[in-house]
Amino acid sequence: MSDVKPSTLAAQALGWSHPSTGALVPSVIPSAPYERAPDGSYPSGHTYTRDQNPTYEQAEALLVALEGGVGAKLFSSGMAAATTVFETLESGSHVVAPRHMYWTIQRWLEQLAATGRIVLDFVPNGDLEGLRSTLRPGRTKIVWVETPSNPTCDITDIAASAQIAHAAGARVVVDGTVATPVLCQPLTLGADLVMHSATKQLNGHSDVLAGALVTRTDDELWTQIGHDRSSRGAVLGPFEAWLLLRGMRTVFLRVPAAARNALRVAEMLAQHPGVVQVMYPGLKSHPGHSVAARQMQGGYGMMLSFRPAGGEPVAKQIVGALRLFRNATSLGGVESLVEHRAPVEGPGTAVPDDLIRLSLGIEDADDLVSDLDQALARIAT
């Protein structure tokens, strides 16, 4: 089905149908063991569900098609996917990561570096010269890129970063959670791996904990990642994989709709006298807008952040005054969420203490704008 568009591949789950019944909805196969043939072989190609399961292989095949890769692996969470990449590295390997990134991965990397397991350097997001000067040719193994970054919405040029990293012998891994393959395909821009917290917009319904890695090449690192996933048991359960695949079938409807809502809200906030800064790459005033416009198609993501006039106390009041935005930690569901982010990340965070993060869902944009407007008006009075 290489002649059809990705949205069609997603909607039809790659055109799958059950070989004996003709069922068009993929099945859940919960079995852990698989039967051997009389000669001891496995004619189905499946040995044990920690290694292979048809249910998650279907979701992996769809991810490969959407990202333009050659292989995909599902994990029990986004963190399991991310940490597996670093667990494959030799002790003392050099890693470069962005200054602003998903806080839990950043904290885990810092802890890994504190034990001497890796050598870690941070560079400002999108600073290509900073990346070039920080690389250690022959020793840097991973350059981690997150674009748009969570929660500051910084943009990094993936193609330029890959060119610089590859010249130093390093691999580039892109956290594509916010963009999803609907808006950006990092592998086609030169990245070696793309990671997703599939809990977010890939699933889209806030009812699955899942992660994924997709690779551009079937190489030694990819083989090691597969071995590590199996040996640590960091696999997704069959039912969760089925829910993820079901969610991915509507991803080309949900992601653009949420991105349109995010742009509408960002434009409103950018004009509001009670807001001092809006962080959203879809705004032409955003410093990374031109790069985002070049490497993203069809929208700029569902996440944005803003800082209100009045600082941290006002930020807390605004979050409490919202009626439709639910105060909860996550991104990418069909419902819109709000979070006063710095207290969630805790001491040492680089996030401003007055930053409010929004995850836009697929509700009516007028309702979302009105909710923010009434909250800001209540604080102003």
Image: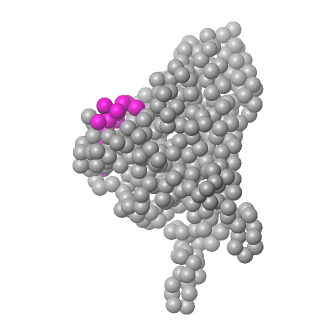
At 49% across and 60% down in the image, what residue appears?
71
| Res 45 → quadrant | bottom right
Q: Is residue 165 left or right of residue 373?
A: left
| Res 318 → quadrant | top right
* Name of the residue lying farthest toward the front: 3
Residue 96 at x, y = what percent? 34, 41
Camera-nearest residue between 75 and 142: 142
At 75% across and 31% down in the image, what residue appears?
364
Q: Is residue 125 magenta?
A: yes
Residue 192 at x, y = what percent? 41, 50
Q: Is residue 2 left or right of residue 228?
A: right
At 51% across and 68% down in the image, what residue appears?
51
Q: Which residues are magenta?
A: 117-132
Residue 199 at x, y = what percent? 59, 47
Quadrant the N terminus occupies: bottom right
Q: Is residue 237 above or below residue 366?
A: below
Q: Is residue 273 visible?
A: yes
- Colour setting: one colour
Q: Is residue 215 left or right of residue 381?
A: left
Q: Is residue 339 magenta?
A: no
* Name of the residue lying farthest toward the top: 381
Task: Report how many numbered discs are placed on residues in the image.
Answer: 0
| Res 323 → quadrant | top right
Camera-nearest residue between 44 and 237: 44
Q: Is residue 102 above or below residue 202?
A: above
